[in-house]
């Protein structure tokens, strides 16, 4: 089963013929991922990496049966690319692009509400179901098929957790990089819920950062609905406060978004909280016993 | 504003000076307290004379232009009544180290150098007592994923205190992302502020134009405090704090040029020019990491090992020799650094290349006197460890994060 992507996913790459798109699409194909083509407006009809190039996502859906898209389009056009994918009927949209203007994402998020689709990211490493589909920029070889699901806001820190899980003699069901932007398509809670409901996942690792309330929301959900052990880590226990200018944000944010506050909430909700990022894998192994 | 700015790593923002923010507002038709910016006393006098012709009075306000609030508390905002006073005030504020509650170290700190002043009209004339001050801000609420207009009758005060002590006086109007600000919402804001008649109409116009300016400039924060209702019922922005979304500056070249690097830490500006994301901290263990999340986690592990992080440094996706060397130089500028922990998880970045980069940089730089702990994991990690171990340099290498943590403990302990 696993979640979001698997060996049967029909994946297209938006921004297929660009430098980033080409590099990562090659890596995905090499991993054995079912990439059925790509989209670059104006290059429809060409062949790239032995796969068809389409002018529009709609063409890729009609002609190649695409149901999943990974986006490597530059920030100025990435919001548009996400909406095009949704409008064309893509079910899982994974946006890797970093640096999309926040106001673009506000509009994208509202636009997507009318479609039956799920956005992962932006500004994320993507999603991988080991041995089935690598739909992202993560190094494939550190992963090992298994039964631990991982949810994370960051890139390399996710790889660290994956590596520890592998070294602890466990493997991963699906690893979901939800992205580090203020507005993301799938929240920590959404991703934890997907893994909690996945019969092939036995334990969940949840890696968060300071800022926002996503981890607290996920923790509260776990408290009510959790059926599997969850290990949590929050990066940024020693991070400095940003330079301040004005005070309006403090009214909107809250006192609950420091690492300390988040870890406290998570622990109170029954999550195995680790204070050292070096103990994520070992703690999961212990929690499963 | 603390919370939203909390993480300096992936919500890049650019602050404007008050005079720049007002230029932006004015270009969208928002009524502002008029004024002119000056770098020198002579320019200030010239601005003052021009302003007097427009206002018909010799009364004016001199305002220090630095990126910090609470300027009045530190003596950075003063009323002048004639040219001699203007000259004297401009001379004293230009070049002063202005301390406010928001400058580094607060009122007890070293303050910030004032390079520019704004010579502005006294917007409260002619009848100070008939004026009313309001608070208005616009920002993106990340939980609701929409913009919100925060407004209050308690203008001119610290809004955090108002929100804490009298939360019923702080109103929020959320804006539909697809429809934008609707006319009834502008009216609602004006009604919430208790306005009627001409002032009501003026406020509706003010809010509508202000919101256009916010979305038109891809701002992440507008804070108008105070927003003034004059004796003749005009609505005027007396102060403004504007923060823009760095990621959107590609479509606002004119605004991008407003960046004042004097307001930023010189080492951080230098780091940025090399593609490094660096934030200086007060600790004794420097670190060099790829990825913001792992960088924060590495800082945490330094602390757990008995050290204190001396910096945040994300080398980004291409940790080649040149970049590693620049990162070394920047970290070593800080005399408090007693050890450096390099933590790279190689995905696309190959660890052997990073290791070679570390060795080359080390040799190029001659004598690095602090101990260096290198932890390389991921693609070609084994080759990387061999390169480090066989380099003959006094560099400790590790593959597991826990081993790196133990090495930090040894070094600082």
Image (tube, coloured by chain):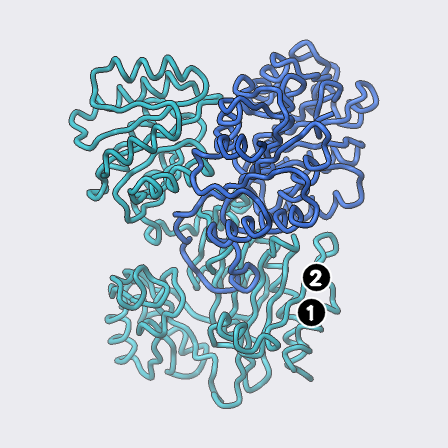
Asked whether, in this view, residue B200 is left or right of residue B369, the answer is: right
Q: Quadrant of the C terminus of chain B?
A: top left
Looking at the picture, how far across and down is residue A171, in whole percent? 58, 23
Which residue reaches farthest front? A289
Which of the chains is cyan? B
What colour do you see for chain A? blue
User: Where does label 2 land, which residue?
Assistant: B181
Between B335 and B244, the one lying in front of the other is: B335
Looking at the picture, how far across and down is residue B140, in whole percent? 60, 56
Up/down of B156 relative to A123, above or below: below
Looking at the picture, how far across and down is residue B63, in whole percent? 36, 70
Between B16 and A8, the one lying in front of the other is: A8
Chain letter of mark 1 equals B
Asked whether, in this view, residue A33 is left or right of residue B66, the answer is: right
Q: Residue at x 81, y 21 (%)?
A: A65
Q: Residue at x 19, y 42 (%)?
A: B335
Looking at the picture, how far across and down is residue A199, in whole percent? 73, 30
Up/down of A110 relative to A157, above or below: below
Q: Earlier in the sequence, mark 1 or mark 2?
A: 2
Labelled pair 1, 2 in contact (Cβ < 8 Å): yes
User: Where does label 1 land, which residue?
Assistant: B186
Chain letter of mark 2 equals B
In terms of secondary structure, where does tag 2 sit?
loop
Q: Residues within 10 Å of mark 1 (few under 14, many from 20)?
A: many
Between A128 and B175, the one lying in front of the other is: A128
Quadrant of residue A91 within the rendered picture: top right
**Distance between the alpha carbons at the discs numbered 1 and 2:** 7 Å
Q: Residue at x 52, y 36 (%)?
A: A154
Up/down of B309 relative to B28, above or below: above
């Amino acid at each position: 089963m696993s979640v979001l992507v698997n060996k049967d996913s029909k994946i297209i790459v938006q921004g297929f013929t660009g430098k980033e798109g080409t590099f990562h699409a090659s890596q995905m194909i090499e991993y054995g991922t079912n990439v059925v083509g790509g989209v670059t407006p104006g290059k429809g009809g060409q062949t790239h990496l032995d796969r068809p190039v389409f002018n529009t996502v709609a063409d890729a859906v009609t002609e190649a049966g695409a149901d999943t898209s990974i986006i490597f389009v530059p920030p100025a056009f990435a919001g548009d690319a996400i909406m095009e994918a949704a409008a064309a009927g893509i079910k899982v949209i994974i946006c890797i692009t970093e640096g999309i203007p926040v106001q673009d994402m506000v509009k994208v998020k509202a636009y997507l509400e009318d479609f039956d689709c799920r956005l992962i990211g932006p500004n994320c490493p993507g999603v991988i179901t080991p041995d089935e589909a690598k739909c992202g920029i993560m190094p494939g070889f550190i992963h090992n098929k298994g039964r631990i699901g991982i949810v994370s806001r960051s890139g390399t820190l996710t790889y660290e957790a994956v590596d520890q899980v592998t070294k602890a003699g466990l493997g991963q069901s699906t690893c979901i990089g939800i992205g580090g932007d203020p507005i993301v398509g799938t929240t920590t809670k959404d991703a934890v819920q997907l893994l909690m409901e996945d019969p092939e996942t036995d334990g969940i690792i949840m890696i968060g950062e300071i800022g926002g309330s996503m981890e607290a929301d996920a923790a509260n959900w776990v408290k009510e609905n959790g059926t599997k052990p969850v290990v949590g880590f929050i990066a940024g226990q020693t991070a400095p406060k940003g330079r301040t200018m004005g005070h309006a944000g403090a009214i909107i944010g809250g006192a609950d978004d420091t690492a300390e506050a988040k870890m406290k909430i998570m622990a109170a909700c029954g999550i195995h909280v680790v204070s050292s990022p070096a103990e994520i894998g070992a703690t999961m192994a212990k929690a499963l016993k | 504003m603390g919370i939203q700015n909390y993480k300096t790593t992936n919500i890049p923002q650019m602050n404007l000076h008050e005079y720049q923010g007002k230029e932006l507002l004015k270009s969208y038709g928002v009524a502002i307290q008029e004024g002119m910016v000056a770098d020198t006393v002579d320019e200030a006098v010239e601005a003052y004379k021009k302003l007097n012709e427009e206002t018909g009075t010799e009364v004016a306000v001199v305002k220090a232009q630095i990126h910090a609030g609470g300027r009045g508390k530190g003596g950075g905002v003063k009323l002048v009544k004639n040219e001699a006073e203007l000259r004297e005030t401009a001379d004293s504020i230009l070049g002063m180290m202005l301390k406010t509650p928001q400058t580094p170290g607060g009122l007890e700190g070293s303050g910030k150098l004032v390079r520019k002043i704004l010579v502005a009209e006294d917007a409260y004339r002619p009848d100070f007592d008939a004026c009313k001050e309001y608070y208005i801000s616009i920002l993106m609420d990340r939980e609701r994923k929409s913009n919100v207009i925060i407004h209050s009758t308690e203008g001119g005060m610290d809004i955090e205190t108002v929100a804490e002590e009298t939360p019923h006086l702080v109103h929020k109007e959320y804006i539909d992302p697809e429809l934008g600000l609707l006319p009834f919402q502008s009216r609602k804001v004006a009604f919430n502020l208790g306005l009627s008649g001409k002032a009501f109409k003026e406020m509706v116009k003010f809010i509508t134009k202000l919101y256009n300016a916010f979305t038109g400039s891809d701002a992440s924060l507008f804070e108008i405090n105070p927003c003034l209702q004059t004796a003749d019922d005009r609505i005027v922005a007396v102060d403004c704090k504007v923060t823009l979304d760095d990621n959107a500056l590609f479509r606002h070249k004119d605004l991008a040029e407003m960046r004042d690097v004097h307001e930023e830490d010189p080492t951080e500006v230098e780091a940025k020019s090399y593609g490094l994301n660096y934030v200086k901290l007060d600790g004794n263990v420097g670190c060099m990491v790829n990825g913001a999340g792992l960088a924060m986690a590495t800082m945490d592990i330094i602390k757990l090992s008995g050290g204190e992080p001396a910096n945040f440094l994300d080398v980004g996706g291409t940790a080649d020799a040149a970049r590693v060397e620049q990162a070394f130089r920047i970290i070593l500028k800080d005399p408090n650094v007693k050890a450096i922990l390099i933590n790279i998880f190689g995905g696309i970045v190959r660890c052997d290349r990073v290791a070679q980069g570390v060795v080359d940089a080390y040799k190029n730089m001659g004598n690095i006197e602090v101990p260096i702990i290198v932890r390389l994991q991921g693609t070609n990690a084994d080759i990387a460890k061999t390169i480090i171990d066989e380099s003959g340099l006094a560099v400790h290498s590790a593959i597991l994060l826990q081993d790196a943590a133990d090495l930090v403990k040894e070094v600082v302990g």
